[in-house]
Amino acid sequence: MSGKTVKQEQAEQLQVAAERAEPKVRQDEELVMPGRFGVTNKQLIPAIKGAIAAGDVERLSLLKERYLYIFANSQRYLKKTEREYIAVHLKT
């Protein structure tokens, strides 16, 4: 017997499970940090511009997939060249 109680073992198992789940949460946070009212144009426009600047089409498609409505509305605030880049690389 290891000398641990059942509650201690369960707590350790929960902690290990939480540590495994953390990377998924971090990826979402790295994508867009929600503001006071959730994800809005204020958060999404810089994320879109950053993905375009990095040439990361996968991140752009992920942003569009997760925040479809805001993504569509945010495009009006981008430069023409940025909108064209999205149109060319994210054909739907």
Image: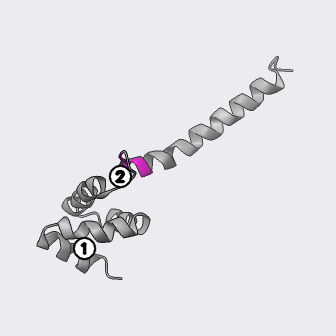
Q: Is residue 54 magenta?
A: no
Q: Is residue 63 left or right of residue 13?
A: left
The spot of residue 6 in percent (x, y) is: 83, 26
Residue drawn 26% across the image and 65% down it = 74
Which residue in the structure is indicated by mark 2?
32
Q: Nearer the viewer, residue 48 or 69?
A: 69
Along the viewing direction, whichever of 89 and 78 lies nearer the viewer: 78
Residue 21 percent across, percent down from the top left? 57, 45
Instruction: State whether residue 24 is above or below residue 19.
Output: below
Secondary element under disc 2, as helix, strand or loop, is loop
**Do we see residue 64 in this rendering?**
no
Tell me where the magenta segment starts and ends, as one range: 28-35
- Residue pointed to by mark 1: 86
**What's the CA distance linking mark 1 and mark 2?**
18 Å
Tell me the amino acid under the disc marked 2. Answer: Val
> Residue 2 is drawn in which quadrant?
top right
Q: Residue furthest bottom?
A: 92
Q: Residue furthest left?
A: 80
Q: Is residue 21 above or below residue 63?
A: above
Which structural element holds mark 1?
Answer: helix
In the picture as drawn, the residue positioned furthest to the right comes out as: 1
Query: 75 or 20, which is in the foreground?
Result: 75
In the rendered image, which quarter contains the N terminus?
top right
- Taking the view exactly as shown, the residue that stands out farthest to the top is 3
Tell me the residue at 24%/79% (across/down). 87
Type of residue at label 1?
Answer: Ile
Q: Is residue 74 above or below residue 27?
A: below
